[in-house]
Amino acid sequence: MPTDIEIAQAATLHKILPLAHQKLGLPEDALSPIGHYKAKLSLAQVEALQGEKNGHLVLVTAISPTPPGEGKTTTTVGLGDALNHIGKQAIICLREPSLGPCFGMKGGAAGGGHAQVVPMEDINLHFTGDFHAIALANNLLAALIDNHIHHGNALGLDVRRISWRRVVDMNDRALREITVGLGGPANGYPRQDGFDIVVASEVMAILCLATNMADLQRRLGNIVVGFTAAKQPVTARELKADGAMTALLKDALAPNLVQTLEGNLAFVHGGPFANIAHGCNSVIATQTALKLADYVVTEAGFGADLGAEKFIDIKCRKAGLKPACAVLVATVRALKFHGGGEGLNSLQDGLANLRRHVENIQQHYALPVVVSINRFDSDTAEEIAMIRQACEALGVACVLATHWAEGGAGAAALAREVVALCEARAAKPAAQLYPDEAPLADKIRAVASKIYRAVEVQFEPKAQAQLQDWQAAGWGHLPVCIAKTPYSFSSDASLRGAASGHVLKVRELRLAAGAEFVVAICGEIMTMPGLPKQPAAERIAVDAQGRITGLF
Amino acid sequence: MPTDIEIAQAATLHKILPLAHQKLGLPEDALSPIGHYKAKLSLAQVEALQGEKNGHLVLVTAISPTPPGEGKTTTTVGLGDALNHIGKQAIICLREPSLGPCFGMKGGAAGGGHAQVVPMEDINLHFTGDFHAIALANNLLAALIDNHIHHGNALGLDVRRISWRRVVDMNDRALREITVGLGGPANGYPRQDGFDIVVASEVMAILCLATNMADLQRRLGNIVVGFTAAKQPVTARELKADGAMTALLKDALAPNLVQTLEGNLAFVHGGPFANIAHGCNSVIATQTALKLADYVVTEAGFGADLGAEKFIDIKCRKAGLKPACAVLVATVRALKFHGGGEGLNSLQDGLANLRRHVENIQQHYALPVVVSINRFDSDTAEEIAMIRQACEALGVACVLATHWAEGGAGAAALAREVVALCEARAAKPAAQLYPDEAPLADKIRAVASKIYRAVEVQFEPKAQAQLQDWQAAGWGHLPVCIAKTPYSFSSDASLRGAASGHVLKVRELRLAAGAEFVVAICGEIMTMPGLPKQPAAERIAVDAQGRITGLF
């Protein structure tokens, strides 16, 4: 069986500029090519499209996943291809994958099988350089912080209260906790510090939520890098970092256009973490796609308790997006995992997870939903029938999707269900879980009780103090971004299925004043992965034809 | 007076693909566009050109510079434009500027005035992403080192003897000396470490000296990252890092094509440090340019004692390049500086520096040379006459070049002198200062006595031990790369003019087994700059038209 990269490299790609012209009517000078198969759409063109009417926005989400994921990206690509296959005009909106993890354990993140965006190896590695720009904008701010302190610290930053960390797009555990500024006066003041992986940078979240260049600079200026000894916030604007950071991000803000294996268009732009950030592709890409196509298929990170909730309560709320329906991706494998074992009984038990997500999407997000089974060769007819039966009892459509093996044709049934849901619904926003004006603590409680079904939220002392301070400092109107395990409705990964009656413990909060949300940390959240004993880097190479191999 | 960026942004650029087709006959599919005005020439095309005959290679070097530099890059661009202006076919080969320093003190490094390569702001910032790729290849190796130790250290690396440092393209003094791996067993073993700026990475030097993809991987594999407790070297190949590093550098190895303000073509590719590395643009770019044009104008870092020496003894030696002549750039300002003051007497005294460089180039590099005065508005007729007189006495041509103010037309006289020198010389290599088989210590002595005019070389105990070890370990055949101040012939920056009779102290050596040279450190060498009190970052911004401002 060919690997993803082999399938991707065997494909014949269309040159992206003529393809975008032919399919979307985009003039070639609206696009800046990066090689022949990637392009950035100019921000002037983004601006020029503002007056157009919007297409239907379809969110692909999932049941609570297992670590390898249940195929949301693959389904997003497959559904986009399928909509085009049945004669609709559809664009796909995906997140950009992170480079670092490609050298660790996971394979690429540009779909899989016959449902991929290409050029696969470019998208997984340097792509159009957006993440490099984000890393440097992040690190310029870090350098300016230490430089400011070195040159007299006029703003009175407390070196013990600097929260801004450096970033690198590499799985590098040795950089999680470090001491910088050693070696004497020429090297500044020593302090504790650490690196996160680039996707965890607040700059990433900001780029993905900014609506234009001015909004980008405004948000960058609002970043709180730390506090003074008197606990007053110090911002990037006070460090005069926002202009130069914007300059570094000027090109990164323009959305990237690529194609699927079937020659349909996809924006792949931005990729914030789905735990400490909102986990969706950029607002600019999504809004632009809606102007260009009748259907826009996008995804949000992890399961519907995390990604979909943040998609609605952060991204849609801020950008005024009105999703038309949701696709809930499920696999037999994950449902059995939630049932705690291997047989049909486990599958039956595990369906509780799917039911809960369907209920949440319908009741709390007020979105119509269709269940899409991401078909594996090992799935039996009985297993599929059991899932179908459960969906029938819930009154939701359930389709078998085989885009991984068959491309868009394999998701045609899913596409028809999606079209039916979209056409039946008048454009209106999804339901938000809380109003802007609710206090931060109540916002966290709203998500915990409605979506996670926790009986209580406990705030540890540090979190309590932060809530109080930040509410008083004027950040109470921000939405919350809850960082917890994706493997359970609770914050305990071992509570599979449809956990309820649990207590959500909030350990600490993190302020993302530029991204405009407050992160609530529940449990251990890793912002810098490590490499395994035998990292994928050991098998990645370039062959005699100059092609990359070993990148699965 | 308009700034460099204002002049650059006012220019009307040609689309690079048709320009390259029209001027060089390159088929459009041999080029991969990065936006409309930058392109990478495919390695397949580089390969296909191998059989063509070579043009003349012209090296632009300089007298010992003052800190702002004397205009080598500007002269290189001006001369390239001038050669085209007088009807010759010429291509320029430059180094890529480093992004980090743009946010510190220095302005851009893509020429200046009316002698620039464009798009100026792209070239100075992310350009085509080469430096980002180099940074990640460097940092992947670093992560694999710490990961190897974390997972059992089968190769027995001594954590006290790891020489491989991480890099970032940012002036960030806080990262010069750090401790990594803190925070307990999950984060690996604590050790001392540090970051250099990207241009100081050995990966940069390797990319610039590699002749093709296989040679790139071979060199990457040869990198010595550190030693075992028994002082045995550990290589990147033993860590199985070379394949993945090559994959990260696959696109970076292809040379970048841009244009001058006058629409002539320039390769801007690679940019190694000129002290701890050889300070020249890539071998691939230079070799390719020689196949495509009758004249290739290139530069080497710092003055003729450093850059030109390394150009000949490292780059030309390894790549088999045969330079036809050298242009020695001088300014009235720098000559006065070398004379120790401001008036005509100081200029007269400072001419000793120019004389010494001319002598070195003629006698020790065996290259014909022309002196080019980079004209400043403040220069007087007497000053110019005095320099001319000195050159006449030396028997070398001296021309006044005003390309900064007038573009290529202002360097037409220089171009004519260069053509005359090239046409008068049969293709033959420059003279090398030492043979491959000389011991490392003798190679250092040869450069010190012939070029620096030192009476003696003193090796400190650490350097002595290293020389002995590395000579014994089989690295004795490598050329040497001397890292010393560029402001003096000696290793003491305060000894201006034409220092002689001094002692060169070699503090330590650094092995660049992948780049294939041994660095001799004389004095303090900074591999991570810091930001000044008021960094340029504070004034860099994006204006309402989406243009970058404040980048001088």
Image (cartoon, coloured by chain):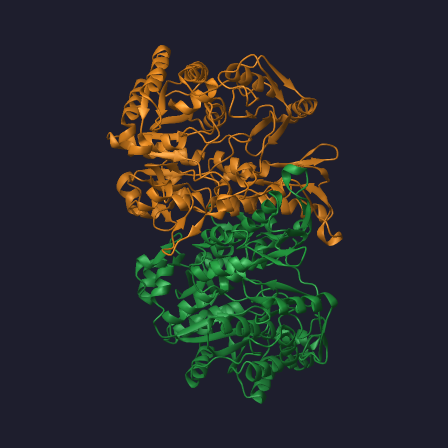
Chain colours: A orange, B green
Quadrant in which the C terminus of chain A is drawn: top left
- Residue A9 lies left or right of residue B300; in this view the side is left
Taking the image as shown, residue A5 lies to the left or right of residue B524, namely left
Task: Residue A3 in the image: state x and y as whole percent.
Answer: 37, 41
Image coordinates for residue B421, horizontal then vertical, percent: 46, 83
Q: At 39% from the left edge and 64% from the top edge, which residue is drawn?
A: B263
Q: Residue at x 47, y 60 (%)?
A: B216
Q: Is residue B64 visible?
A: yes
Instruction: Examine the rendering and report whether any part of residue A90 can be seen.
Output: no
Toward which corner of the image does residue B334 lie, by quadrant? bottom right
Q: How many marks?
A: 0
Looking at this view, is B356 or A461 the one in front? Answer: A461
A385 or A224, which is in the foreground?
Answer: A385
Residue B353's spot in the image, x, y percent?
64, 79
Look at the image and tell me in which quarter the N terminus of chain A lies: top left
Q: Nearer the viewer, residue B47 or B297?
A: B47
Q: Position of residue B258 (x, y in %)?
A: 42, 60
Residue that sits furthest to the left in the current view: A87
Query: Which residue appears at 72% of the width and 43% of the height?
Result: A191
Q: Is residue B249 above or below residue A240?
A: below
- In which quadrant of the rendered view does residue B42 lie? bottom left
Pick whichever, A464 or A399, lies toward us. A399
